[in-house]
Image (tube, grey):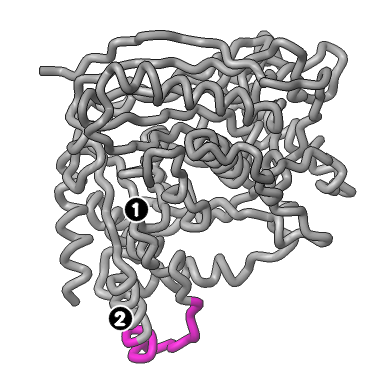
């Protein structure tokens, strides 16, 4: 039987305390994302106490009241993106009585299937993600959904507009909300707020002496013209998010858990293969390089097909610490660029040395990262424009540095955190392992037959 969602309530949550209006102009980092699909996450909490009465009387009221309180410190999240008719670019504007929408629902799906270690249909996750309101005139910053799985647990779904906040800012807010919710239940409300989670709204910390902003806006203008079949779009200032491709019904999700020992095994294997190769070179074998190179190799092999087909990879780069002067870690907004390597040939990754070749590429990409990566934001848009259906680019959502498994709202640590929006492209997700022992979780979204091949490859590769 197909799972069905019962929507119980949709509420507007206003900040508990707001002092007037607030306007934040978008920076070139924000403008990179303003038409792209929102980032969607679902955070699952297991609780056999999660009955409908407990959900209605405790879980939902606590989440709503702590959300209202948290929004007082994150006013822009209750606001909207708007583009004034005379303005050069959009701004994020909060006005009194603006609110965040939160949906409360009940779902009759199998909680253990969605949080477990077996593949399941990707479509099972879609009812758990709230819609993000957007139109030609405005776009919401964020929306939430709390869904009960009776007697199994509940989940919190988040849709976040990528032009408003990057992964670092999103998780900073979620940590603030979780901390506020937990302290209310522990009755420690009067303890001081965590200062590292208080957002900084000063846009002047993002320097733009080379007017990258204009370059990004011009790139978007030509991109939108191309999407409109070569003619000028009807409304060049429309804030409507670009439509997403229709997903194949046979797409499945799978989360692969790599332990710290698994990662060390793969690291040692790369060291052996590198020293035995014809061109031995010191590789930067960080957890990210090892994990991403492994996932990249396995996905390309699982896809099979013509060895000469074009492939590539791309990953987001947090620029806060790379810029001079550095941008404070609590800066609110986007401060990410991306590193792309396209096009490469699939055959490079399909041979005996495929994993080593992937690690060399990714290691070199990481080594190249410096302040100049921020200047490459227009190149990222240009790279997005060149990606066709024929070019298979594996990108990464999430990070092992976000600490998503520390999000305890008062009902314990998450059972599983999934990035739903990786379905919208050839992406994988990465997060730190749930047990906190140095492992990594990798989320995959592929067609069923490809996923079966991928799982075999992922497991076989650890036996080398």
Image coordinates of residue 428 in percent, x first then y, are: 38, 47
Image coordinates of residue 411 in percent, x first then y, are: 38, 39
Q: Does the magenta segment cover residue 283?
A: yes
Image coordinates of residue 457 in percent, x first then y, are: 19, 60
Which image quadrant is residue 103 in? top left
Q: Give the residue number, with chain letter if any, for mark 2.
A: 269
Q: Which mark is residue 442?
A: 1
As helix, strand or loop, the secondary structure at mark 2 comes to: helix
Quick one: 373 or 225, which is closer to the camera?
A: 373
Mark 2, other Cα within 10 Å: few <14 / some 14–19 / many ≥20:
some
CA separation in Å, label 2 and label 1: 20 Å
Q: Earlier in the sequence, mark 2 or mark 1?
A: 2
Against 314, is 275 above or below?
below
Image coordinates of residue 313 in percent, x first then y, are: 46, 54
Quick one: 195 or 203, which is closer to the camera?
A: 195
Q: Main secondary structure of the magenta part?
A: loop
Residue 389 shows in the view: no
Identify the residue at image location x=47%, y=72%.
286
Q: Which residues are magenta?
A: 272-284
Residue 407 shows in the view: yes
As helix, strand or loop, the secondary structure at mark 1 comes to: strand
Horizontal side of 272 relative to 66 (left or right) equals: left
Horizontal side of 11 relative to 48 (left or right) equals: right
């Amino acid at each position: 039987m197909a799972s069905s969602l019962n929507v119980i309530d949709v509420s507007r949550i206003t900040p508990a305390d707001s002092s007037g209006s607030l306007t934040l102009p978008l920076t070139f980092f924000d403008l990179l994302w303003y038409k792209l699909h929102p980032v969607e996450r679902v955070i699952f909490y297991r609780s056999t106490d999660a009955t409908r009465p407990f959900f209605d009387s405790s879980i939902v009221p606590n989440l709503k009241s702590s959300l209202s309180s948290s929004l007082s410190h994150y006013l822009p999240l209750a606001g909207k993106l708007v583009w004034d008719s005379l303005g050069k670019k959009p701004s994020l504007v909060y006005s009194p009585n603006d609110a965040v929408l939160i949906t409360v629902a009940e779902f009759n799906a199998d909680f253990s299937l969605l949080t477990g270690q077996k593949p399941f249909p990707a479509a099972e996750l879609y009812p758990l993600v709230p819609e993000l309101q957007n139109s030609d005139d405005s776009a919401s910053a964020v929306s939430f959904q709390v869904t009960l799985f009776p007697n199994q647990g509940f989940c919190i779904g988040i849709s976040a507009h990528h032009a408003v906040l990057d992964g670092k800012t999103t998780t900073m807010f979620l940590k603030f909300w979780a901390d506020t919710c937990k302290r209310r239940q522990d009755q420690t409300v009067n303890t001081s707020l965590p200062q590292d989670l208080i957002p900084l709204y000063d846009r002047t910390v993002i320097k733009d002496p080379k007017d990258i902003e204009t370059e990004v806006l011009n790139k978007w203008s030509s991109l939108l013209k191309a999407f409109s079949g070569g003619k000028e779009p009807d409304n060049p200032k429309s804030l409507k998010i670009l439509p997403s491709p229709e997903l194949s019904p046979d797409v499945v999700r799978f989360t692969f858990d790599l332990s710290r020992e698994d990662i060390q095994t793969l690291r040692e294997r790369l060291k052996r293969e590198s020293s035995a190769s014809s061109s031995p070179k010191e590789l930067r074998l960080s957890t990210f390089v090892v994990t991403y190179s492994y996932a990249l190799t396995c996905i390309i092999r699982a896809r099979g097909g013509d060895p000469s087909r074009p492939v590539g990879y791309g990953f987001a780069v947090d620029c806060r610490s790379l810029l001079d002067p550095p941008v404070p870690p609590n800066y609110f907004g986007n401060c990410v660029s991306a590193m792309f390597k396209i096009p490469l040939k699939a055959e490079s990754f399909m041979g005996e040395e495929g994993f080593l070749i992937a690690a060399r590429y990714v290691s070199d990409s990481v080594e190249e990262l410096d302040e100049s990566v921020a200047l490459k934001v227009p190149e990222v848009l240009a790279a997005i424009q060149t990606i066709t259906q024929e070019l298979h680019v594996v990108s990464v959502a999430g990070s092992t540095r976000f600490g998503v498994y520390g999000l305890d709202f008062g009902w314990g640590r998450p059972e599983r955190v999934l990035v739903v929006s990786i379905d919208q492209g050839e992406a994988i997700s990465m997060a730190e392992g749930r047990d906190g022992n140095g492992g990594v979780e990798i989320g995959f979204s592929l067609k069923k037959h490809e996923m079966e091949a991928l799982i075999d490859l992922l497991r076989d590769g650890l036996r080398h």
